[in-house]
Structures are given as C-alpha cells and as structure tokens.
Amino acid sequence: MKFGHWLNSLTWVDHLVILLLFALCSWFAHLTMKGFRLLVEKTQHSPYAEEFRTSPFVFFAVAIPYTIILYRLIGIYLTEMLKSTF
C-alpha cells in the first residue's frame, strides 16, 4: 500500500495517536540533539572551534524515525485504548 493510501485509510484516532507520538518523539529528538551538543562541546577543547548548530532537517531526521519506532511498538495499543475510551 502506498503512503498516501495508508494515510487516507486511517481514522481520526489513528491521526491523533500519530500526532501525540510525534510530539513525544520531537521532545526525544530535542534531548538527543542537546546531548550530542554537550558531547561535542566536551570533546572540543579549542576555544576557536565553531559552535555546534542543528538545522530543522536534522531535527526531523531524528524525530521521524523515533516516531516510526514508537508507533510500531505502542501505536496499536494506544489506538485501541483511545477507541475504547471515545
């Protein structure tokens, strides 16, 4: 099934679960990049070294795989729990 067909076949609860998981994974991605920045600063001893900067592309490149992994692990359980609640 193509990605577009898969998205159209989802219910509003599925979209809500993916949105919630993406918000959580965005926070995980932020923590990952913050930790990586601390690691780079710790290993660089030169005061003239450039500051480590991240771009939005790197942020999404980290957040999207986190979202896919979490959705595969707990997405079905979370969807069923929300469907039974609403």
Image (cartoon, rainbow, N blue to C red):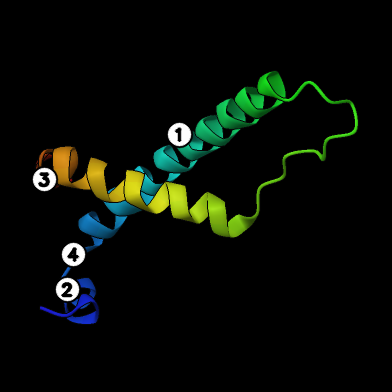
**Closer to the N terminus: mark 2 or mark 4?**
2
Q: Secondary structure at mark 1?
A: helix
Q: Are marks 3 and 2 in contact (CB under 8 Å)?
A: no
Give the spatial CA distance, label 3 vs label 2. Answer: 15 Å
Task: Give residue 29's position: percent from left, percent from top.
Answer: 48, 39
Residue 53 percent across, percent down from the top left: 72, 45
Counting residues from the start of the chain, the first of labels 2 and 1 encountered is 2
- Indicate whether 27 appears above or below 6: above
- The residue shown at (22%, 55%) is 13
> Which residue carries the number 4 mark?
11
Distance between mark 2 and mark 1 Cα atoms: 26 Å
Residue occupied by mark 3: 76
First in sequence: mark 3 vs mark 2? 2
Q: Which residue is mark 2?
A: 6
From the image, state whether disc 2 or disc 1 is nearer to you. Answer: 1
Residue type, label 3: Ile
Measured in 3D between alpha carbons, the distance from the residue under mark 1 to the one under mark 3, in whole angstroms, is 20 Å
Q: Looking at the picture, how far across and down is residue 70, in whole percent?
A: 25, 41
| Disc 3, SS | helix
Q: Nearer the viewer, mark 1 or mark 3?
A: 1
Point 68% across, 18% down: residue: 42
For label 1, the residue is 28
Label 4 element class: loop
Amino acid tagged 1: Phe
* 3D distance between C-alphas at marks 2 and 4: 10 Å
Q: Is residue 5 above or below residue 78?
A: below
Counting residues from the start of the chain, the first of labels 3 and 4 encountered is 4
